[in-house]
Amino acid sequence: MQHSVEHVDKPSAGSNADAGRVSLDPNELAALCEQEIGRRDKRFAIERPVQLTAVSLDGMLDTSRRHNRTSREISARGISVDVTSGTFHASQPLLLGMHFEQLGVQYAGLIIRRVEQLEDSTLRLGADFGGPAAEVLSTGHLMPEFRAEQMAFVMPQGPQFYDTWTESGVLQKTLLDHVMVCPRCAAIPTVRNACRKCGSGRVTNDRLIHHFACAYVGFKSEFETGTNDLVCPKCQMRKLSIGADFEYLIGENRCRSCGWRDSEVELVGHCLRCSNRFEMTQAREQELYRYDVSRLDPLAVTSELG
Ligand SMILES: [Zn+2]
Ligand SMILES: [Zn+2]
Ligand SMILES: [Zn+2]
């Protein structure tokens, strides 16, 4: 704002630097600001059942400190509520639940700005929307997020935190998925078919050839001659053609690391974060939940009332 005032005061005639810049009268600007603040501050009487719940600075809900009250006034910025019991102080964070006939309860975070003593032992709380509860209810807080640097799905808070909010009826929990994660650090592992003895992924399955005429079965490499020709090592028959003279068979799995031979392989996970290598049957199952909330939109409420 200071910038604009300075700019307007400067003589602009003949100055190329000012070309194309919009000059705004400082009085006009002040009037605009006032109008904007006035709109945000415009209060409307609203008598509705509300529920105030104490919230700690880290966003934990304290349902033992929950009070049912009546709201008095609302603006796009805040709300006032009359209370007759409970302890309240300025800058205290709260969760507001406001009842609507059609929509049910809608929630918003609050920070108390003023505590005013009325004639009859009633306290009038003036609170602004925002604070720790508002942060918990924000979209980014309610969905698991995949973080590449951690190779994991994470939520901003632990499961117990969300359980408290869900049990209190504020959040609705929906199961999104089950994912297999590293049993040590919960990162998403890479997975391979591996040797059952040593866990190595260096397992090959050499194809076998079954020569019909002499019934010999051997590795494909034994039939290879360096040319395109396949020659049976047992009966020396040349120019074997697939289907007519031989068939391919699935061979044994051979581990290039430990030499183990096996008809079966095993799913083995490898964690890229903590280097843990484990059988996938040992993987931990992580449940991914989404949380939904019915949010109070103060702008919608005030424009309805205005
Ligand atoms: Zn790990
Ligand atoms: Zn092996
Ligand atoms: Zn043969």
Image (cartoon, rainbow, N blue to C red):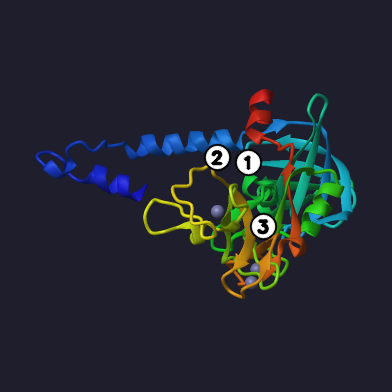
- Circle 1 sits on which residue? 77
Q: Position of residue 83 (x, y in %)?
A: 85, 46
Above/below status of 103 relative to 271: above
Disc 2 within 8 angstroms of ligand 3 (CB): no
* Mark 2 neighbour class, 10 Å CA radius: few under 14, some 14 to 19, many 20 or more: few
Which residue lies most toward the left here?
14
Which residue lies most toward the bottom here?
258
User: Earlier along the polypeptide chain: callout 2 or callout 3?
Assistant: 3
Gap in angstroms between the C-alphas marked 1 and 3? 26 Å
The label on residue 156 is: 3
Q: Quadrant of the C terminus?
A: top right
**Residue 306 showing in the rendered view:** no
Secondary element at image label 3? loop
Q: Which is nearer the eye, 190 or 107?
A: 190
Above/below status of 274 relative to 213: below
Q: Position of residue 115 (x, y in %)?
A: 76, 52
Above/below status of 37 relative to 127: above
Q: Position of residue 31 (x, y in %)?
A: 43, 35
- Circle 2 sits on which residue? 243
